[in-house]
Image: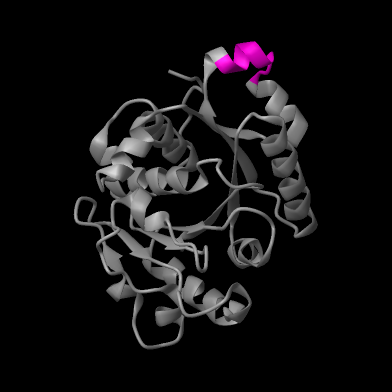
Amino acid sequence: MGEIIAVLSGKGGTGKTSTCAAVSTALAREGFRVLAIDCDVGLQNLDISLGLSDAGALSFADVYGGGYGLDQAAAHPAFPRLSFLTSPVNLSPREVDHDAFGRMLKQAAKEYDYIFLDAPAGIDEGFQLAVRHAHRVILVTLADPAAVRDAKYAGARLELMGKTDVRLVVNRVNRKIFSTMAVTIDDVMDDTGIPLLGIVPEDPNVTLAAAFGNALLSYTSKGAAKACENIAKRIQGITVPLSVK
């Protein structure tokens, strides 16, 4: 059975979606069958980070509604073991059928090794949709006080929902800014109370790859791309040292 992983953030602007896309791509490149689903109803962006903005992908509602099968999810041209479903444009978050979505995920877990759910920022309806059926959760945050506080709140909500396999990714880490702020990764872990899965450095290639319509791992093998590859290895249970290059 495949593993369902929800990727969350307490606030917008943390780079959650780009992280979700890069980790999904890294696992697919290693040979795993991966399905990435955009759960941000009305504000779809995962396709851009995946380099699939011109793919014309089906929405997850198209599939759970019975009109299409999971085998018709958009396949990535550069990473053929990676498939993608976007979020519906004709529904509001409250109109999404959570039970039908769950049944679709149950079937997806039979067909894929990993299913990544890119949730909208915050802890509203989309958060609930992504978390409800997830086997594990990745919470992406920055190191600034507002992001850390919101990550802490999100972590508390996850605990109330009974989610115990929650790991933290600290994104856009800049050593000089950390030094000026007198902040460490340990401080972020202590403030959120969530164990660490990965550290992703600030990297302009994340923006450049998206601007040129490429997946990050097609554009570069360094910086954020390498960090996300390491996160993909840790998801598999492979020990990789935590550091910022």
* Total marks in image: 0
Q: Residue drawn at (38%, 26%), measured in percent from left and top?
A: 223
Q: Residue drawn at (50%, 41%), measured in percent from left and top?
A: 15
Looking at the picture, how far across and down is residue 128, in whole percent?
66, 65
Q: Is residue 55 above or below residue 217?
A: below
The answer, for residue 127, to whether it is visible in the render is yes
Q: Nearer the viewer, residue 234 or 143?
A: 143
Looking at the picture, how far across and down is residue 235, in whole percent?
49, 42
Relative to 105, is 191 on the left or the right?
right
Looking at the picture, how far across and down is residue 65, in whole percent?
45, 86
Looking at the picture, how far across and down is residue 29, in whole percent?
28, 45
Magenta span: predominant SS is: helix
Identify the image quadrant of the C terminus: top left
Q: Give the range drawn in magenta.
A: 177-184
Q: In this view, does 175 lie above or below 166?
A: above
- Residue at the left extreme? 77
Q: In this view, does 210 lie above or below 197?
A: below
Q: Residue drawn at (40%, 80%), measured in percent from left and top?
A: 63
Relative to 65, is 182 on the left or the right?
right
Q: Residue drawn at (50%, 68%), measured in percent from left and top?
A: 42
Q: In which quarter of the image is residue 18?
A: top left
Relative to 86, is 132 on the left or the right?
right
Display colour scheme: one colour
In magenta stretch: residue 162 = no
The answer, for residue 194, to whether it is visible in the render is no
Relative to 52, is 183 on the left or the right?
right
